[in-house]
Image (cartoon, grey):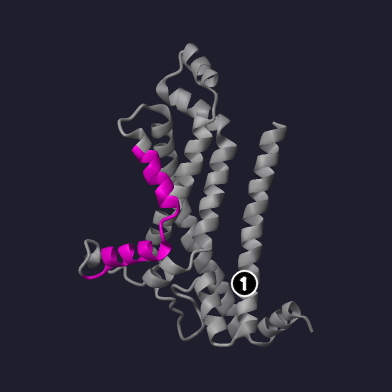
Amino acid sequence: MTPGLASLALLAEFPFESVYVRSIIFVSLYVSVIAVVLSTLVSVPIALVVGFTDLPGKRLIKSIINTGMGFPSVVVGLLVLFAVSNQGPLGPLELVFTKEAMIMSQFVLATPAITAVSLAAVTSVEENVRDAARSLGGTRLDVALVVIKEARYGIATAILAGFGRAISEVGSVLIVGGNIAGSEGVSKTRTLTTAIQLEARQGRYETAMVLGGVLVAIVLLVNAIVVRLGDDRVMG
């Protein structure tokens, strides 16, 4: 029997494993999707402001954004953990080892990537497109909407790239989430990446392979969408 079939047989034989795997997938998608949605709401406006205006220190702002793309995830995890700990500014909210703390961590990690790629997409829109919108009497908001429409493929790619980084993250979510699962096999803060690490360390390779297969499938799906968007942009 192949490893893949053995993994499926394991899930069929032990319902606990099925509940366990489904809950981990849910937590991973829940945390990553919310973090990326919040990051998009912040990143795209920042990209538009930086791309449209001649801000003082604009080069420095771009450097900070690009630096954030390579910021060590474990350091982000430590900073978020400090912020939500009893001694931190968010201590009264009691967010230590919760999904909310994981969302904060992934938000910090995804925002620079989404901002940088969105900024590149916005600045690549030709100036004559903006001039045409202005000549038709468009307000600054109208011009921004036109630019967003022209840069939509690049912005969509940025969002997917941010999601790919978020769902593949292990270091920061392990630090702030604690990799917790209940006694009934329901994940509380355990994600695909942290569960794979734990299961492999404990020698439960079948479960680790199932989780790894799910993670690879999600990443491949995201990459396929990115490639498709790129092809559509070229054809368009």
Q: Judge the density around disc 1: few (<14), some (14-19), many (≥20) Cα neighbours within 10 Å.
A: some
Residue 25 pos. (x, y %): 56, 69
For the record, the magenta segment spans 60-86
| Residue that badge 1 annotates | 212
Local secondary structure at mark 1: helix
Residue 86 pos. (x, y %): 22, 70
x%, y% of residue 52?
42, 28
Confirm whether residue 38 shows in the render: no
* Point 43% across, 33% down: residue: 48
From the viewer's side, name the closer residue of 163 and 137: 163
**Mark 1 residue type:** Gly
Q: Is 18 positioned to the left or the right of 197 in the image?
A: right
Q: Is residue 75 magenta?
A: yes
Q: Quadrant of the C terminus?
A: top right
Q: Is residue 82 above or below residue 209?
A: above
Q: Name the quadrant of the N terminus.
A: bottom right
